[in-house]
Image (tube, grey):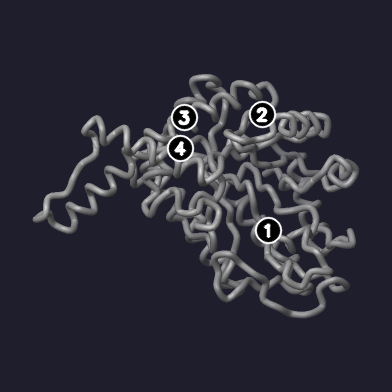
Amino acid sequence: MEIGIHEEAQPQDRELIRELGVTWSKFGHDVLNGNDEQLDRWLDWNGEAGLRTAVDLRTDNSAIFSRCIGAWEKLKERGQIETCAEDVSEADRVGIIQRNQERTSIAALTEIADLAAGIVSKYGDRCQDWEIWGEAQCPYVSGGVFGDRYQVYSGLLELCYKQIKAVDPSARVWSSGNGMDLDPTFIFAILDDKRGEFFDVANWHPYFMACRSFEASGTIMRSSFERTRRELQERGKDQPYAATEWGYPCYNVETAPVEELLKSHVVSDGIRQLYWSEQAQWYERDLQMMQEFGFEVVIVHCLRDTYNPDNPADRHWGKFCGLLDVKGERKQIWDVVQKWAWEGRAGKRAFE
């Protein structure tokens, strides 16, 4: 199992990255409004540093909504939007709404898939791994653009898969990384929509958010990984596991001595950091279990804490997940991740 670092790793951190021993990196690219020059620089730097890259292909929510509105009008003009009779049952009404939503969304997202395939065609000589819209399940990240049953997301995944494979058959398409508290329904929804063949990597973001029981979290993780493996064997292609993001907010003794609940966009009560005394145990356990279940790659979020210590309101949990604190001091988890990264270098290369 290889270890990577999320996008916060900057070129000035080259020596730290080499010392840490990671072999992968992940960052996002907007297929409509992305900075291609920045993507060029990142891929060049990763190549020089010996890092393989997974790129999260996405775009702005508003771009999706505007295209859906346009697609709806065109489909309506063609008589391809179903209408509901007054006496239709509630179940039939819901079915009509869902079919209209899927039909409209797929029409709108064809352009997005074409643009994604264009990025793959342009950069396929430097990148083989492409995540399709990371954390599409998260209402804050996707802004509700993908609906309730993932019909829209699974449609996007199918379109992107077909278009990407057409321009680069060797490319690996990763499903959207999700999995808050190890809930596997994000993968089951794709399988329910009969689109289990349209991704090559079953991608997790296996963050425990609400759960801070070490025993309970271990039980949940094992159950989720086992159940999802069975479903992928039965309704997918038995795709390998990987994670484009994983980690925990963690205290450092010097810089975070006060217990508090950190802010979250989706967990109303907030997120508790792992204490100094427990963080190494959690990281070690999770990595051991992910290796046991055949994860090819685990990309750690992230290298550095990024909150502003002078701004009391800047307390989002994701900004406290660094292996280094805001002063650049190493947390206990540095040693755990470094050990696993160097062991990963000694094993087989991911996906080979």
Question: Mark 2 touching mark 4, by CB under 8 A?
Answer: no
Ranked by sequence position, the earlier of labels 1 and 4 is: 4
Residue 148 pos. (x, y %): 38, 54
Residue labelled with disc 2:
127
In this rendering, the count of numbered labels is: 4
The crowd level at tag 1 (other Cα within 10 Å; few <14, some 14-19, many 20+) is many
Measure the C-alpha gap from mark 3 to mark 1. 34 Å
Ranked by sequence position, the earlier of labels 3 and 1 is: 3
Q: Nearer the viewer, mark 2 or mark 3?
A: 3
Residue labelled with disc 4:
157
Question: Mark 3 touching mark 1, by CB under 8 A?
Answer: no
Ranked by sequence position, the earlier of labels 2 and 4 is: 2
From what the image shows, is residue 111 above or below residue 262? above
Residue 147 pos. (x, y %): 39, 51
Please name the amino acid that badge 3 sits on. Glu
Residue labelled with disc 3:
111
Pick the front one: 149 or 18? 149
* x 49%, y 39%: residue: 239
SS of the residue under disc 3: helix
Measure the C-alpha gap from mark 2 to mark 4. 19 Å
SS of the residue under disc 1: loop
Measure the C-alpha gap from mark 2 to mark 3. 22 Å
Rendered-image quadrant of the C terminus: top right
Measure the C-alpha gap from mark 2 to mark 1. 24 Å
Question: Mark 2 touching mark 1, by CB under 8 A?
Answer: no
The crowd level at tag 2 (other Cα within 10 Å; few <14, some 14-19, many 20+) is some
Residue 221 visible in the displayed image: no
Please name the amino acid that badge 4 sits on. Leu
From what the image shows, is residue 249 above or below residue 344? below
Residue labelled with disc 1:
247
Q: Nearer the viewer, mark 1 or mark 4?
A: 4
